[in-house]
Image (spheres, helix red, strand yellow):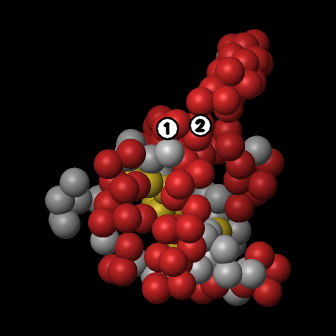
Amino acid sequence: MTAGSQIGGPAGRALTGNLRAFARDPLEFLARTARDFGPVSALRFGRSRAYLVSDPAMIEEVFVKKRLDFIKAGPIRAQRRLFGRGLLINEGSSWSHQRRLAQPAFHPGKLGPYVPPIAQHTGKMLERWKSVE
């Protein structure tokens, strides 16, 4: 993606943008948007703009390699009262500290016991999705 390229996204309503479609079924909306518009999609929720990044390498770029170049949007930061300063909302050195504390739990050796139930639930979910198509 080049600096001059346009970022596409789903058409939204004049005032609410993509809010209604997102609220109806967030996972389906995001999956369809990524499938239809590619690795980066533009979204609008009311007057706020957002971008859906669905390419794993780009996600790593945003959340790990260049995390200091990106700040959380105002509406996300406003959720601190509700969610506290967890990894989703936190920023800066406090985020880095929390990430280092959480990282060992995601080591491949620690994830082994979770693989069978994750695979089982994923299989069931995919079967449900196939029945919807």
**Can residue 14 be seen in the rendering of this structure?**
no
Q: Amino acid at mark 2?
A: Leu
Instruction: Kindly indicate whether the residue at mark 1 contacts the one at mark 2 (C-beta within 8 angstroms).
Output: yes
Q: Amino acid at mark 1?
A: Pro
Q: Please tell me in which quadrant of the rendered image residue 62 appears.
A: bottom left
Observer-nearest of 95 and 38: 95
Q: State the mark number for residue 68.
A: none
Q: Quadrant of the C terminus?
A: top right
Residue positioned 23% across, 59% down in the render: 5
Location of mark 1 (residue): 108
Horizontal side of residue 23 vs 114, given as left or right: right
The secondary element bearing badge 1 is classed as: helix
Observer-nearest of 41 and 118: 118
Image: 67 above or below 41: below
The secondary element bearing badge 2 is classed as: helix
**Can residue 65 be seen in the rendering of this structure?**
yes
Location of mark 2 (residue): 111
Label 2: few (<14), some (14–19) or many (≥20) C-alpha neighbours in 10 Å: few
Label 1: few (<14), some (14–19) or many (≥20) C-alpha neighbours in 10 Å: few
Residue positioned 56% across, 67% down in the render: 101
Image: 4 above or below 114: below
Horizontal side of residue 24 vs 111, given as left or right: right
Residue positioned 57% across, 73% down in the render: 98
Where residue 125 appears, as percent x and y from the top left, is 73, 23
Image: 83 above or below 65: below
Q: Quadrant of the N terminus?
A: bottom left
Q: Please tell me in which quadrant of the rendered image residue 6 appears.
A: bottom left
